[in-house]
Image (cartoon, rainbow, N blue to C red):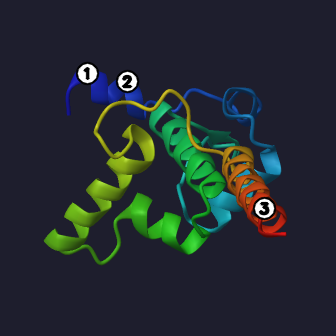
Amino acid sequence: MGFKELQKNLPVFSISVVTKITQLTARQIRYYEEKKLFTPKRTEGNTRLFSFNDIDKLLTIKDLLTKGFSLKAIDEIINEKDVSAKTTQIRQIIHNDIFAGPNGLPRERSIGRGDLSRFYNKKKINFNVRFFNKFFTEF
C-alpha cells in the first residue's frame, strides 16, 4: 500500500464533518453503516471516524440513490458481491455511463428528475399542438 492509499484510508473525520461534506444527515450515514454499505473505523470510545475513502463511498451512495438505484443494488455495486468477469465489465459500462455519459466524456451535470419532466412535458405539449392544429385544419 502506497503513501497515497494510506492517506485515503486514514480515519480522521468525525461524523459532523462528514455530514457537512456529503450533505447527508448523521442518521442517513448511520443507516448506510447499519446496512453494511460501508464500515467506518471506531475509536476506543466507540466514536466513528471516517476516511477519504469512506466519504467517497458515501458520495457514491448518495449519487446512486438519486439516480434511482436500490440499496441492495448499491450494496452489490459498491462491495462487488458475487462478481464474475462479465458482471464487472457490465458494471464498469454502467458506471461510466452514469458518471461520464454514454460518449465517455464527462457530463456537465447529471440528469435530474426535473430535466426528465421538462423533456416529457415539452414532448406532450408539442404533441397536443400538432393534434389540435391537425384537428382544426380538417374542419
Q: Secondary structure at mark 1?
A: helix
Report which residue position mark 2 lands on.
7
Mark toward the start of the polypeptide (3 vs 1): 1
Residue 47 shown left or right of residue 59 in the figure: right
Measuring from the top left, give residue 77's x and y in whole percent: 41, 63
Residue 69 shown left or right of residue 66 in the figure: left
Amino acid type shown at disc 2: Gln
Amino acid type shown at disc 3: Thr
Amino acid type shown at disc 1: Phe
Report which residue position mark 3 lands on.
137
Residue at mark 2 to residue at mark 1: CA–CA distance: 6 Å
The residue at 56%/39% (across/down) is 110
Residue at mark 3 to residue at mark 2: CA–CA distance: 71 Å
Report which residue position mark 1 lands on.
3
Query: In which image quadrant can residue 7 be found?
Result: top left
Q: Secondary structure at mark 3?
A: helix
- Front disc: 3 or 1: 3
Q: Say whether residue 41 is visible.
A: no
Q: Is residue 125 above or below residue 19?
A: below
